[in-house]
Structures are given as structure tokens and as C-alpha cells.
Image (cartoon, helix red, strand yellow):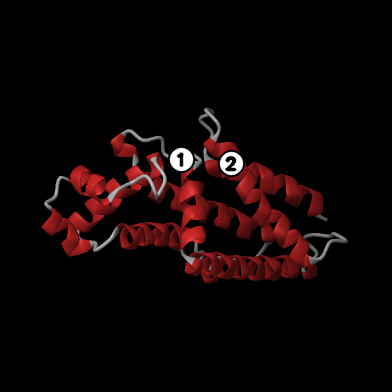
Amino acid sequence: MNDTREHILKTSLLLFLQKSYRDVTMNEIVEKTSLSKGAFYHYFRSKEELFKEIASAFFEKGAVDYSSFSKVSLHTFYNQYADFLNNSMLSLSSMVEDAGFRSFNFNYFVILFEAANRFPEFLKMELDLYKKDIKAWTKIISIARKKGEISSESTDEDIAGLFLYCNDGVFLRYVNSDKPETFRILLLNAYDTIYGNLKV
């Protein structure tokens, strides 16, 4: 990515994490980047365009390539999934850490909610990602059940939802915690508990 474009995105992300979309002005963004208006507008024509690109980056980092995950066991699968999520979060946090901003806070959720509220395409993107997630998880759970790895009266899709829904709860706990535990550790603790209750 072009260094100037990356600088604009990083600077804007910091502003959107500190204030709402409505409260951040284009003049403020241009001023914080220390670019001339002409140089700035060469890259982004509007605040909306800029915000969309930031929100797109968030959604893209949450899109999982399940084809690279092992199908040997549910245990291996969810460990690889936890690694993926943790690496995605590290990638996002690296954009703001050197500016002294706390790596993760609730404002990351605000950006996603604002994007989904203002731009319908993001709501559809989130729904499409969820459908892809639930399909991949349901498939590995079905495989695990057939192999005799797990046993439960719950449907494969219900179990898949249980794993996926706990991501949000773990994330909320993580961003609201002063503990030095990593997101991956917290997530795997939750997954191991679910798995332990399913394991034959």
C-alpha cells in the first residue's frame, strides 16, 4: 500500500476510534495528517469514502479462509481458528499501538456498527461472513461427530453457533480487562470448555 494512503488511513482510524463518524470532520482529518488539502483529496474525495475503506479493512480481517484449516479434528480446527483471530487482532492493533492508543476498546465495535448502520452493503457483508462461518463450523462438527470425536444431542449447526457466539463475549471481556492475558488464551479457554463437554 502507498505510504501516504496508509498514513491517512491510520490517522483517520485513530480519530474514528476517539470520536464518532459524525463528530470527525474532513478538515480535522486533513489537519491531523499534515497534508495539504490537494494532496489529501488525491487519495480520498470524502469522509464517507475514507470511512468505508477503514470499515472494509475491519470486515476483511474478519474473513476466514477455512480452506487452509485442518479437518483432522474439531480440536485442531478451533485452535487454528483462534490463531487466525488472534493474528487478525494483532494486525489491527499494530495500526494504532505506536500512537499510544490502547490496542482494543469498545470503539472498534462502534466503527463496525456505524458502518453497518450507514452503509447497507456492510450489513450484507457481515451476514454473508456469518453464513460462511456457520457453514464451515457446521461441516467440521459433522466430521467430528462422524469420527466419534464428539457426542451431543444438539444439532451440528447449534454447536457451531455456540462456538461462534462465544467469540463476541470473549472479545468484550478482553477489551474490558486490564489482565495481561491474550485474546487467544481467553478464547481457547472458552472453546476448551465447550469441547470438553462435547468430547466422547
Three-letter residue code for mark 1: Phe
Residue 108 sits above or below residue 124 on the image: above
Tell me the SS state at disc 1: loop
Q: What's the residue at 33%, 43% (across, down)?
A: 15
Compare residues 82 and 175 and report the one nearer the observer. 175
Q: Is residue 42 visible?
A: yes
Q: What's the residue at 16%, 63% (across, down)?
A: 42
Q: Position of residue 122 (x, y in %)?
A: 49, 65
Q: Quadrant of the N terminus?
A: bottom left
Q: Sequence-wise, which precedes: disc 2 or disc 1?
A: 1
Query: Could you tell me how far apart the alpha carbons at marks 2 and 1 are, in whole angstroms?
Result: 10 Å
Q: For this view, does 64 lie left or right of residue 188?
A: left
Q: Position of residue 47 (x, y in %)?
A: 31, 57
Tell me the SS state at disc 2: helix
Q: Residues within 10 Å of mark 2 (few under 14, many from 20)?
A: some
Q: What's the residue at 42%, 47% (across, down)?
A: 90
Three-letter residue code for mark 2: Leu
Q: For this view, does 8 lie left or right of residue 164?
A: left
Q: What's the residue at 39%, 49% (across, down)?
A: 22
> Where does label 1 land, which residue?
104
> Where does label 2 land, which residue?
172
Q: Residues within 10 Å of mark 1 (few under 14, many from 20)?
A: many
